[in-house]
Amino acid sequence: MVYIYYQLTKGNRLPFGNYHNMEDQIKQEATCEQELIAIRDSLEILGGKWKLRIMRHLNNHIAETNTFKKIQREVEGISAKMLSKELQDLETNLLLTRTVMNTRPVTVSYAITEYGMSVFPVTETLVQWGLNHRQKIK
């Protein structure tokens, strides 16, 4: 903070903004800290190899009955144990619902919630970035 204070008292422009006093600098740090916390929280909920892929699958097949076996078959490479864990985490975070169907044998279906739909713009942006990135590195 001493370096920042020195820069501010000399009226120099800092590389990350132009502040007139320490209060402006502190406000900027709080905003940055809040953003970093929000990113951390988002990654805790959606991070990992499978969660966004599961969410994208459910979104793309919203009108269909998505049973555990169907999701496991279509999200290639995921084990039953991992899928079970990820579905449970997504349900805990209110991103999907789990419905036990009255069938013999018992089947369970999963559906994206309205709140879960709020993840769609994130996945859409990631899809577009991923497609562009593949083209860039070819």
Image (cartoon, rainbow, N blue to C red):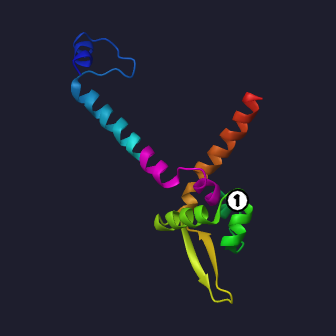
Where residue 104 appears, as percent x and y from the top left, is 69, 90
Residue at left 70%, top 75%? Answer: 65
When asked about the image quadrant of residue 119, the answer is bottom right
| Vertical arrangement, residue 95 with respect to residue 126, above or below | below
| Vertical arrangement, residue 83 with respect to residue 9, above or below | below
> As drawn, is 7 to the left or to the right of 121?
left
Where residue 95 appears, as percent x and y from the top left, is 53, 64
> As drawn, is 13 to the left or to the right of 94?
left
Which residue in the structure is indicated by mark 1? 75
Q: Secondary structure at mark 1?
A: loop
Dominant secondary structure, magenta:
helix
**Badge 1: how crowded within 10 Å, few (<14), some, or many (20+)?**
some
- The magenta region covers 39-55
Of 81 and 30, the residue lying toward us: 81
When asked about the image quadrant of residue 24, the answer is top left
| Vertical arrangement, residue 22 with respect to residue 102, above or below | above
Where residue 89 appears, as percent x and y from the top left, is 50, 63
Where residue 84 appears, as percent x and y from the top left, is 58, 67
Residue at left 31%, top 11%? Answer: 12
